[in-house]
Image (cartoon, rainbow, N blue to C red):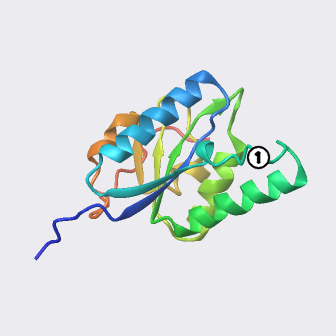
Amino acid sequence: MESKNLRNIRVFIASPFFSEEQVDRVQRLENALMQNPYVSEIFSARFHQFPHLEFGSKEWRRTVFRNDLRNLRRADVLVGIRDFEGKYVDSGTSFEIGYAYAMQKPILLINEKNATMNLMLSDSLHAYFTRVEDVASYDFHRMPKAPYVGPVI
């Protein structure tokens, strides 16, 4: 018999949030995930910046780093936004994706900007989406695969 409460998946969001466009995209992702009937909890680093600590200080860096990794280890799945700053994917997002892969966590990647994918990202992911809103209806219990099909570098 299936439980009536389907919401038991913890999601770690890996995404930059340095520009208005990036904040808009991550907000749409947070909303989509909270609409998903399987998601019970999301961790979005933009809400965990410890404003009582001096930005950039050793204490702030250590606290943010440890908190992010603790929440990534707790998560069942990573949902990442592939976003470019200049020519490159955000380095923090790439680090979190690699860490999740090393921990054998499923990686769902969203690429709304339609740029050529680096094979280290394309071949590490479990499912690929071109719209943030698609995760609102994704079945996080069955975890259907949706591979990236396209050019790589």
Q: Secondary structure at mark 1?
A: loop
Q: Residue furthest front?
A: 52
Q: Is residue 74 above or below residue 60?
A: below
**Residue extending furthest left?**
1
Q: Badge 1: how crowded within 10 Å, few (<14), some, or many (20+)?
A: few
**Residue found 76% across the figure and 58% down from its top:** 63
Q: Is residue 63 visible?
A: yes
Location of residue 19 (image quadrant): top right
**Vertical position of residue 26 compared to residue 21: above or below:** below
Residue 113 visible somewhere in the drawing? no
Question: At x 35% / y 35%, what residue is drawn?
Answer: 133
Tell me if 128 is positioned left or right of 97 in this view: left
Q: Using residue 99 as the reference point, say whether residue 31 is left or right of it.
A: left
Quarter of the figure with the C terminus = top right
Residue extending furthest bottom? Answer: 1
Q: Position of residue 53 (x, y in %)?
A: 80, 48
Return the residue at label 1. 52
In the picture, the quarter occupied by the N terminus is bottom left
Q: Residue 87, how many percent across, how many down?
A: 71, 29
The front one of 83 and 15 is 15
Q: Decide which of 44, 127 is in the foreground and name it.
A: 44
Q: Is residue 119 above or below residue 2?
A: above
Q: Amino acid at mark 1?
A: His
Above/below status of 133 relative to 127:
above
Of 33 and 101, nearer the camera is 33
Give the farthest residue toward the right.
Answer: 58
The residue shown at (44%, 41%) is: 30
Picture coordinates of residue 114 (x, y %)? Answer: 49, 29
Seen at 39% across and 33% down, the residue is 131
